[in-house]
Amino acid sequence: MAWETGAWGMAVPRLAHTVIRGGEKYRGRAGLAAFLGGGAVEVSIYRSTLAGLLVQEPGSDTLYYVGEGDRVVFRRSYEELCHWHNGPLDKPDDPLKRKYCVKPAYTQLGYCREHSDSLRAHYSRCLSTAGAQGRSSCLLIDKRVKTSYSIYLASYRHGLKVGVTRTWRLHNRLAEQPHAAATELARTNSIAEARSLEEEIGRMPGFTERPHKRGLAEALEADIAAEAERIRAAAERIARRLGLRWEGDVFSVRPRGDLIPYYRRARIVDPFAAAQAAEIIDYWGGHLLVYMGNEYRLVKTKPLLHMDTLIVKT
């Protein structure tokens, strides 16, 4: 850190960077198969570990990681900074080498005037805006960027959520969302095609692009075998209807096993009202797990990002 050791320094959090590890397999029975002793479903288990919360000193383009064991105080801020940075869309990059813009955002998508027509802005617009405007951004991305996109389906106990992400980010994207099980429905080299499939599936009964209720504890407590069976049945139905070639693989991206009990019992708090130091423990499902006031708590990351909301103990 550039700040004096032992001092408190202000910082703008940009993202929670996670490392995904695989190798585990879950096998279980659900429904009629469990009753009759039939075949077990198999789910690939990936583990998400916080590499660090990327932070930026106000007025500086220097980036640092604030990670497990670091202490922070959350402060309320109302000025959102531009989301744009120079990382590539088609492959992983080193987050510490990005150049974030520090100008105030003026669009709902979070971009300043200078970068409202950047590739990053068009990518966000393509995946979050309906109609002709979103479609034109998708087509522009297809002309300028060559990469693979995945249409995925995630079970979050209350329903089934369909989404799109770049294929190389699939497991990281799922780590950002509370879910019990997930699968890749299809893969395409066109983001316009991927977005069109996402919208079509989202209009089908029982599916949504934007779920209203997703709890971390509920997702982690859900019966993985039962959710995997639900995912499998839904994916087969979608594949038949849309003529997709579904590979049949079901997976789940979960926190470290030793941290799951803390995620299950931790209560979501307003970090700005707490006004006390918090020790960062982990990140999963769009929430930081912190130790605050002698208890484990959950803090939503969305209200923190791209604003001057952290004071970091160095």
Image: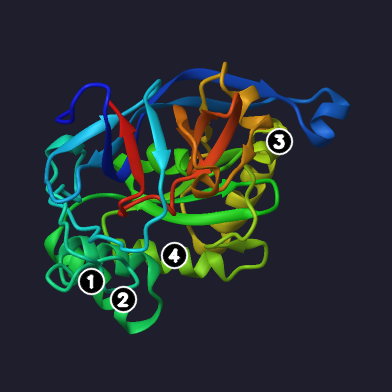
The residue beneath circle 2 is 135
Q: Are marks 1 and 2 in contact (CB under 8 Å)?
A: yes
**Crowd class of label 4 (few under 14; some 14 to 19; many from 20; radius 10 Å):** some
In x, y percent, where is residue 253?
A: 50, 32
Which image quadrant for residue 221?
top right
Describe the element under mark 3 as helix, strand or loop: loop
For marks 2 and 3 on the same chain, the one whose residue lies earlier in the sequence:
2
Mark 2 and mark 4: Cα distance apart in space:
12 Å
Is residue 94 at least partly visible in the picture?
A: no
For marks 3 and 1 on the same chain, the one whose residue lies earlier in the sequence:
1
Residue 139's tag is 1
The residue beneath circle 4 is 197
Closer mark to the observer between disc 2 and disc 4: 2
Mark 1 and mark 2: Cα distance apart in space:
6 Å
Closer mark to the observer between disc 3 and disc 1: 3
Residue at image location 14% in from the left, 44% down from the top: 98
**Crowd class of label 2 (few under 14; some 14 to 19; many from 20; radius 10 Å):** many
- Residue 50 to residue 286: above or below: above
Q: Are marks 2 and 3 in contact (CB under 8 Å)?
A: no
Describe the element under mark 1 as helix, strand or loop: helix
Total numbered circles: 4
Amino acid type assigned to the residue bearing label 3 in the image: Ala
Which image quadrant for residue 212?
bottom right
The residue beneath circle 3 is 222
For marks 2 and 4 on the same chain, the one whose residue lies earlier in the sequence:
2
